[in-house]
Image (tube, helix red, strand yellow):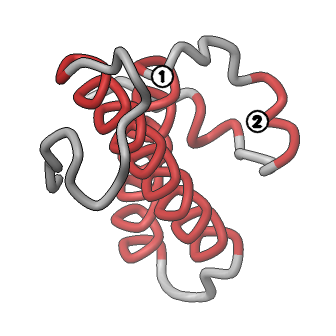
Amino acid sequence: MSLRLPGQNSTPASGQTGVDVLDYELMAEKAASLGRAGYYAEQHLNLLRNYQGDADGRAVLLKKTVEAVYAWFIQRELCGLRRHDSLIREYAIPKEVLVRLGAK
C-alpha cells in the first residue's frame, strides 16, 4: 500500500486532515483486497467445477478452493458485509466447500 501525504497528487478539500486522508487510503486498500479475494475465490471455484483429474488432485484443489472462499468471506466481513447468502447463490458455491469453511 502506498500512502500519499495530504496535498500530493491531489488537492485536499478544505478542512481535510491527515486522518481523513489515511481513512480514504485504508478504504481504498480494503476495496482492492476485497476485489482480489473475490477474484481468487471465483478462479478456484471455476477450476473445481471443471476439474477432470484424479481424486487426490481434486482433494488438493478442494482445499485451496475452501481457503480462497474463506479468505473472501473474512475480507467481506472486515468491510462490514456480513451476509453471504446472495454470493453463495450467485457463484453456486458447492456444499462440499461450504461445510469445510473454517475447518483446518
Q: What element carries label 2?
A: helix
Mark 2 is on which residue type? Ile
Residue 33 pos. (x, y %): 38, 47
Residue at 17 percent across and 53 percent down: it is 1
Q: Distance between the residues labelled 2 and 1?
A: 18 Å
Kindly report which numbered mark, 2 or 1, lies closer to the viewer in this rendering.
1
Residue 83 pos. (x, y %): 69, 14
- Depth check: give the residue in front, 10 or 49: 10
Mark 2: few/some/many CA within 10 Å (<14, 14-19, 20+) = some
Residue 54 pos. (x, y %): 48, 82
Q: How many marks?
A: 2
Mark 1 is on which residue type? Cys
Residue 98 pos. (x, y %): 59, 32
Q: In which quarter of the image is residue 75?
A: top left
Q: Which residue lies furthest to the bottom in this view?
A: 53
Looking at the image, is 95 positioned above or below residue 35? above
Residue at 86 percent across and 45 percent down: it is 90
Residue tagged 1 = 79
- Depth check: give the residue in front, 47 or 28: 28
Residue at 52 percent across and 66 percent down: it is 44
Q: Is mark 1 on a helix, strand or loop?
A: loop
Q: Is residue 73 left or right of residue 51?
A: left
* Mark 2 vs 1, N-terminal side: 1
Q: Do the residues labelled 2 and 1 touch (CB within 8 Å)?
A: no
As drawn, the label of residue 88 is: 2
Looking at the image, is 76 positioned above or below residue 60? above
Looking at the image, is 90 positioned above or below residue 81? below
